Image (cartoon, grey):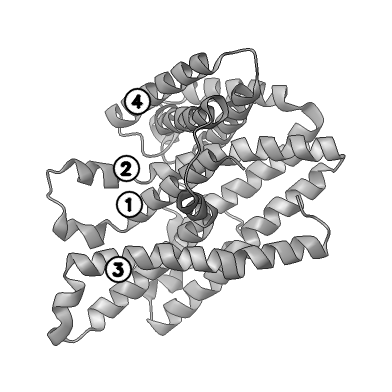
Amino acid sequence: MYTSIQFLRAVAALGVVLFHGFFLLQPFVPIDSWLVGFIHRGYVGVDVFFVISGFVATLSVEKYLKSGRSGLGFLINRALRIYLGYWPFYFLALVLAIATNSAARMDWDLVKSFFLWFLIGRDQGKILVLYVSWSLAYELIFYLFVASVMFHLGRKMMVIFAAVISLLLFCFSFFPGAKGDSAFVLISFFGEFLLGCLCYSLASTSHFSSVFKAILALFSISFGLYVGLSFDADIGPLRFFGFGSFSFGLVLFFVILEKGWGIVFNQFLVALGNASYTIYLCHTLIFEISQYFSANISLDYRWVVESSVWAMLVLLSIVSFSILYFRCVERPIYRGVTAFFRLQE
């Protein structure tokens, strides 16, 4: 795997962590600081993840086709990667909710949450045991599409699909009902996934120079930031043109840096990228634990949870736990299961 992809996974995961953990940092960040705007846009890490997913899926398909393996094997492999990583944190979320007597569990749909059978719009996340799992349900749909379409029609058809989806989203960009509608939310993120497929095709082709690709990437970054920030594109079709385009340009640019100019990233950033799935899944639970602890701490130690040191310790615990969990639990389990069923990539 490209070190640049792992680096971007790490950045995307940390962006989402900061977005959800703003309550920890808010007392120590000036309200007019540029950091506030940066942290509030941390959700863009999800867009980066979707583009990376499309990139990696296309790369994996080419490997599968060269080795003569089927789309079904690809789909099973991807599903195992998602579920084996997700289920431990699903059960941990249940245990925490019971232990803390959380009222949120009254609205949860345990079966849909367990199997990731749902689509959400703006206000439907309350049914999820683990809120961040909404993106995993979308990933499964995207991988099903890849397994049933890309293996038969090839990479070029993905470019056509990307163009069709882009046109559809453009037509509905300013339709008021499209912004929070679950179908358009799905299509928007599917478009970002297809941008990842296109990104891999561009990065792999020899028809264009590295300089041209880098310029295209920088243009996409600039255009995406302009649209995303100007129209506050937090969800729906405009998010695709805004932060989806930004994420496409970002992934393409860093891949070209590595592929075209040989720039690689250090091992810590790669390790952080490897653990990015765990970071994504565990961070909200660690935040909940920290909030429960801070709410029940005695007055004598109140200064601890009201200091910047506490905020840094919570963030550091997320990173440290994720790296250790990935190396000691997540990766061995995944490798063991896929080896048992002879599904190793």
* Mark found first going from the N terminus, 1 or 4: 1
Kindly give the residue lying farthest to the right in the view shown: 68
Amino acid marked by disc 1: Phe
Residue on which disc 1 sits: 19
Residue on which disc 2 sits: 41
Q: In the picture, residue 148 is in which quadrant?
A: top right
* Mark found first going from the N terminus, 4 or 3: 4
Most foreground residue, 75 or 126:
75
Q: Secondary structure at mark 2?
A: loop
Crowd around label 3: few <14 · some 14–19 · many ≥20 (10 Å): few
Q: Which label was assigned to residue 227?
A: 4
Q: Secondary structure at mark 4?
A: helix
Q: Secondary structure at mark 3?
A: helix
The answer to the question of whether label 1 and label 4 lie on touching residues, with beta carbons closer than 8 A, is: no
Amino acid marked by disc 2: Arg
Q: In the picture, residue 87 is in which quadrant?
A: bottom right
Report x, y in % for residue 254. 48, 32
Crowd around label 2: few <14 · some 14–19 · many ≥20 (10 Å): some
Q: Is residue 26 left or right of residue 291?
A: left
Report x, y in % for residue 193. 57, 36
The answer to the question of whether label 1 and label 2 lie on touching residues, with beta carbons closer than 8 A, is: yes
Crowd around label 1: few <14 · some 14–19 · many ≥20 (10 Å): some
**Mark 3 against mark 1, which lies toward the viewer?**
3
